[in-house]
Amino acid sequence: MAAHQARLTDEEIVVDLAVVMSAGQLPAAYWISNTLRLMLVDGRFSLTLSGGRRSIGHALDEVVWQDPPIQNFPARWAARATELGGQRIALGDMLLLGLAGANTDPAVCSALALDATGNRAHMSFSHGEHRCPDPAQEIAEVVARTAVEVLLDRLPDVTLAVDADSLRWTPSPWLRGLATLPVIFTPA
Ligand code: HEM
């Protein structure tokens, strides 16, 4: 940023860094923990790394479709009056993006949702000019995949320490992530 030809001021760099850190940290952490939760509670997924590489990709894809870290995103303001899905939107109206709802809208994606593996047509990174930047999406996927792979490599017998039903989600209208994910494992 400091070397960019646009010559950002120090203040602009600080604001941009804050956006990158706040936009990146929790969503990536929740992508990892939601994927681990799914693999720990759902018998379709193999928990051993040797049997599980395909499982990890499948679980990451399923989470980003069905259980995405950012469920709803505030906020957009309409730059002109328009109509969307039969609803009138006036100039200046505030719009909340229902990303998770869009992914699972039965009118558009019931067939996709059945097998989302490798399908990137979801809305979990939003869409348009202010979507999660493409390089950030790629970094997030590398980080999440590596985290799950390394965890299963180092702790191959990891299992859930509590009933799946007792896992608590952090209360938030925007983000979807667990407060804790208690597990048992043999120390390596
Ligand atoms: C390395 C991790 C990540 C980084 C560095 C990162 C970075 C960013 C940045 C800088 C923005 C602001 C873009 C803008 O305002 O123009 C953004 C927006 C966003 N990111 Fe990410 N992100 C990361 C991971 C994720 C993950 C894992 C998800 C969800 C699966 C996600 C979903 C979003 C969404 C929904 C937005 C809002 C887009 C909008 O305003 O419509 N991001 N991200």
Image: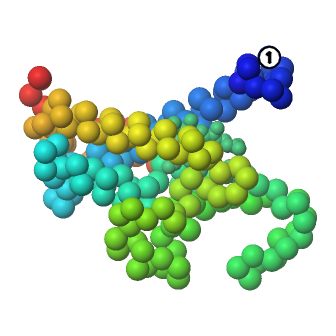
In this view, the residue in front, 156 or 85, is: 156
Examine the rendered structure and indicate whether residue 129 appears above or below residue 142.
below
Q: Position of residue 170 (x, y in %)?
A: 45, 42
Q: Quadrant of ligand 1?
A: top right
* Left or right side of 76 for 168: left
How many numbered marks does the figure carry? 1
Task: Decide which of 107, 181 is in the foreground and name it.
Answer: 107
Residue name at image x 59 percent, y 29 percent: 21
Image quadrant of residue 43?
Answer: bottom left
> Label 1 belongs to which residue?
10
Where 67 falls versus 180 (above or below)? below
Farthest residue to the front: give it. 5
The location of residue 51, given as percent across then percent down, is 13, 50
Q: Residue furthest top?
A: 10
Q: Is residue 115 left or right of residue 21?
A: left
Indicate the quadrant where residue 59 lies.
bottom left
Quarter the C terminus occupies = top left
Q: Which residue shows up at 67% across the image and 32% down it?
A: 19
Amino acid type indicated by mark 1 = Asp
Q: Is residue 5 left or right of residue 67?
A: right
Q: Is residue 119 left or right of residue 186?
A: right
Tell me if mark 1 has few (under 14), some (14-19) or many (20+) residues whose alpha carbon lies within 10 angstroms of its own: few
Give me the residue at 35% from left, 63% from top.
117
Query: Who is closer to the viewer here, 152 or 22?
Result: 152
Q: Is residue 164 visible?
A: no
Up-down: is 41 above or below 104?
above
Looking at the rendered image, the quarter that the N terminus falls into is top right
Task: Give the residue displayed 65% in from the left and 58% down from the top.
Answer: 127
